[in-house]
Image: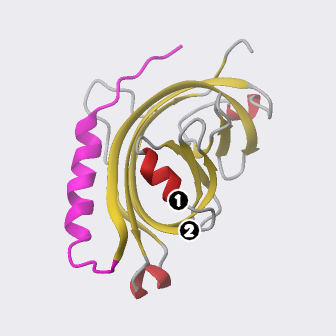
Amino acid sequence: MRKVKISSILILTGLLVASASLEGVQSKDRRPPKEKWIQVTLKASVEALDLEKRLVTLKGPDGNLATVEVDKRVERLDEFKVGDVVSAEYWTYIKAEFRDPIPAEKKEPLVVLAEAGKAPEGMDPAAVVGAVVRGVVTVEIINRPVMQVTIKGPRGRYLTFPVADKTLIEQLKVGEVVVLTYAEALALSLEKVAK
């Protein structure tokens, strides 16, 4: 298995661009925004696979779902099938703004604020993907016992992430609209592992 270390510089650069792009956004907050860095290493099962679009939906051990795009340089994607257990590791940055979207966000609910350039020298370029996006998302599942929330983005993709703030998770409601800034640098190893 090919192990890849993720460069947080890649994400940080994107976030700086994203922060500059968000200046001037004004709307009344329902509650203060929250932001968090998360490193996730897990075994997940393949729940859905779209070979043409190179999309894989993974289900983690706690039932969390994530749809990820697999880089074209990753070979032999066609060897995987629904039900396979794979290994995945990635970093994410999430900033949730609990406010109504402004008119520009309603008109364009998904905006790519920054995309990563090349991976740093010495790092396998096929293994790292980076992006910073802002989207108008909907809360789909609230799993209070394990402190996780699953959101659905404007393109119908899902993302599950942990929530550390117990008060916040108690206040959230299924169907609530949130403006989410999301960044990831992803080292995804679609390597089959023992179930």
Which mark identifies residue 176?
Answer: 2
Instruction: Pick the residue in front: 81 or 158.
Output: 158
Residue type of the residue flagged with mark 2: Glu
Comparing 157 with 177, the one in front is: 177
Give the image location of residue 137, x and y in percent.
53, 65
Above or below, 182 against 124 in this view is below
Q: Which mark is residue 172?
A: 1
**Residue beneath the point at 27% across and 36% down:** 8
The quarter in which the N terminus is drawn is top right
Compared to residue 92, the image places residue 141 above or below, namely below
Q: Residue at x 48, y 17 (%)?
A: 2
Labels in figure, total: 2
Closest to the observer: 47 or 78?
Answer: 47
Q: Label 2: few (<14), some or many (≥20) within 10 Å?
A: some
Q: Is 24 colored magenta in this rendering?
A: yes
Q: Cα distance, mark 2 to mark 1? A: 7 Å
Name the residue: 64% across, 32% down: 60
Lateral position of residue 150 relative to residue 9, left or right = right
In the foreground, 12 or 176: 176
Image coords of residue 117 (percent x, y): 31, 48
Looking at the rendered structure, the secondary structure element under dot 2 is loop
Q: Looking at the picture, how far across and down is residue 101, in whole percent?
A: 43, 78
Q: Secondary structure at mark 1?
A: loop
Figure colour scheme: secondary structure
Residue located 50% across and 51% down the image: 169
In the picture, the disc for residue 66 is none
Q: Would residue 115 be visible to someone looking at this image? A: no
Check contact, mark 2 vs mark 1: CB within 8 A. Answer: yes
| Left or right: 97, with 58 as reference point | left
Q: Residue furthest bottom?
A: 103
Taking 189 as reference, is 78 above or below it? below
Give the magenta range. Answer: 1-28
